[in-house]
Amino acid sequence: MNILETKGLYHDFSKLQVLFDVNLQVKEGERHAVIGPNGAGKTTLFNVITGTYHPSRGKVFFKGKEVTGARPHEMTRLGMGRSFQITSTFGRLTAFQNIRLAILSKKGIRFQFFRKVDNMSAITEETDQVLKRINLDRERNIPASMLSYGKHRALEISLALATDPDLVMLDEPTAGMSKDETHYAVQLIRRLTEGKTLVIIEHDMDVVFSLADRITVLHYGQILATGSPVEIRENQAVKDAYLGALEV
Ligand SMILES: Nc1ncnc2c1ncn2[C@@H]1O[C@H](COP(=O)(O)OP(=O)(O)O)[C@@H](O)[C@H]1O
Ligand SMILES: [Mg+2]
């Protein structure tokens, strides 16, 4: 079954056409990588799927239900979690507070009520469990902006997962990481997405080919190919357009 599907998706920014007839299919339980050169439209595709933008044309289906145009918080409630290419943590809040905020927003508890729920031990407990799972329990009370780059990005990845989504969408989670940090992040992603569906935009081909069950290649806003890592590696159109240049 496809947990996520787009049908004939188009998007443009004023006159700039960015997505053309994108028919993406993500199967339940798979790890699906979206790759393609800079400017191909990968982040825009995420933004259209997660409700940040309304598509110019076409439809988005999540868990078999049409969700085109649903707002981001509705998508979160339906079971979709996402991370951003640009850091979206609250730098002055601690690791604990960032995770708690993500958990509270999923539960629909608004900021005004924050102080009251401050003492809610169930939420505190849930937050501490997440911190432990992501090995940030020792950094619990450190402001996000003071964390090392790798730990900060790990927190970022975890925010997408703090709401326990069925589908996790990560936009270049390893961008700017050292080799060690990337290795750690991939292990974290693998562990945290166990039993879930993952869609990941990733530029590091080692990560893509080690993590993904299936790969979709986006090129100038169109899907060039979808297939297993072996199929993508051997696809002539993909080699010509993209992978060849990277010597994969
Ligand atoms: N908010 C925006 N307004 C106008 N143009 C945009 C906006 N976001 C992205 N673009 C343009 O859309 C194209 C695709 O961008 P993007 O989806 O970020 O690509 P990718 O994530 O694959 O690098 C690029 O040409 C980019 O400049
Ligand atoms: Mg992008």
Image (cartoon, rainbow, N blue to C red):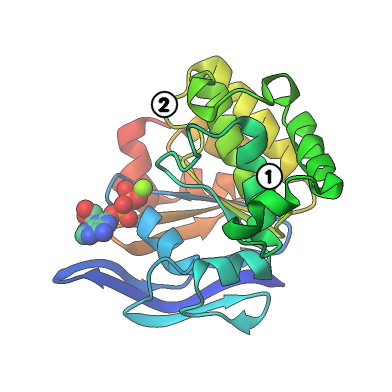
User: Which numbered disc covers residue 159?
Assistant: none
Q: Position of residue 158 (x, y in %)?
A: 64, 40
Q: Determine the CA span between mark 1 and mark 2.
A: 26 Å
Bin the neighbour count of mark 2 within 10 Å (Cα to Cα): few under 14, some 14-19, many 20 and up.
few
Dot 1 or dot 2, earlier in sequence: 1
User: Considering only vertical position in the picture, is 230 above or below 186?
Assistant: below
Q: Position of residue 41 (x, y in %)?
A: 33, 57
Q: Position of residue 25 (x, y in %)?
A: 56, 68
Bin the neighbour count of mark 1 within 10 Å (Cα to Cα): few under 14, some 14-19, many 20 and up.
many
Report the front residue among 200 and 236. 200
> Residue placed at 42% from the left, 37% from the top?
203
Q: Is residue 240 visible?
A: no
Tell whether 130 sits left or right of 111. right
Task: Specify whether tag 1 is near ligand 2 (CB below 8 Å).
Answer: no
User: Considering only vertical position in the picture, is 18 above or below 30?
Assistant: below
Residue type highlighted by circle 1: Arg
Which residue, given by chain and number where applicable, does mark 2 sit on? 176
Occupied quadrant, residue 106: bottom right
Occupied quadrant, residue 13: bottom left
Which residue, given by chain and number where applicable, does mark 1 sit on? 100
Residue type highlighted by circle 2: Gly
Q: Quadrant of ligand 1?
A: bottom left
Query: Helix or strand or loop: what does disc 1 sit on?
Result: helix
Report the front residue among 192 and 237. 192
